[in-house]
Image (cartoon, helix red, strand yellow):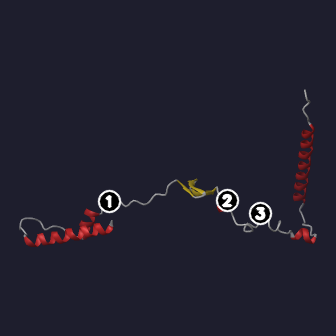
Amino acid sequence: GHMKRAAAILILLLTGATAAAQEQPQNEPKPDYSREKLIQIFANEPVKEPVEPRMQLGFGYVDFKALRMRWRIAYLPILMPLSGSVPWASNRAFGNLPDPFALTGTEIAYGPRTWRDMRDMNAELKRIERTEKVRAKVTVNPE
């Protein structure tokens, strides 16, 4: 690309200079070999920036652009995190990480609002459990 273009410009300059030195008629204007003129002649090709594709498929992942962000979704277990590298996930090899509050018997002080929310949540869970038991008892009579 660039080397061929540079060689072509050099050859053109040399042949032009020798031709101009051999015969120089008085009435013709002198050819313009200034840098600006040469750039104007040879650099009219627009420089194209490489455009990233909207979606790329790789080995085990899909890479796409949406909502002005780049997303990479892995669908093979090759790209899963290593065992023990995710601290909040339960680790099968060592069991769950020990809870220091449970081990020492420490009670965490709750504010009245948190206490009320937890009580409401427990009541809701018990209600769901009751309705599920009732639903499970319903049997279809054999014909």
The circle on residue 89 is 3
Distance between mark 2 and mark 3 Cα atoms: 16 Å
Relative placement, left or right, of 53 versus 112 is left
Disc nearer the start of the sequence (2/3): 2
Distance between mark 1 and mark 2 Cα atoms: 46 Å
- Within 10 Å of disc 1 (Cα), the crowding (few <14, some 14-19, many 20+) is few
Q: Amino acid at mark 2?
A: Pro
Disc nearer the start of the sequence (1/2): 1
Q: Residue furthest left?
A: 26
Residue 7 in the image: state x and y as whole percent: 26, 70
The residue wearing badge 1 is 45
Disc nearer the start of the sequence (3/1): 1
Q: Residue at x 18, y 72 (%)?
A: 14
Q: Quadrant of residue 131?
A: top right
Residue 25 in the image: state x and y as whole percent: 6, 67
Q: Residue at x 94, y 69 (%)?
A: 105
- Within 10 Å of disc 2 (Cα), the crowding (few <14, some 14-19, many 20+) is few
Q: Amino acid at mark 3?
A: Ala
Which residue is at the front of the view, 66 or 113?
A: 66
Q: Residue furthest top?
A: 143
User: CB under 8 Å between callouts 2 and 3?
Assistant: no
The residue wearing badge 2 is 77
Residue 96 in the image: state x and y as whole percent: 83, 66
- Within 10 Å of disc 3 (Cα), the crowding (few <14, some 14-19, many 20+) is few
Which residue is at the front of the view, 33 or 75?
A: 75
Residue 18 in the image: state x and y as whole percent: 13, 72
Asked if residue 25 is positioned above or below residue 59 in the image, the reply reads below
Q: Residue at x 11, y 66 (%)?
A: 29
Q: Residue at x 91, y 35 (%)?
A: 139
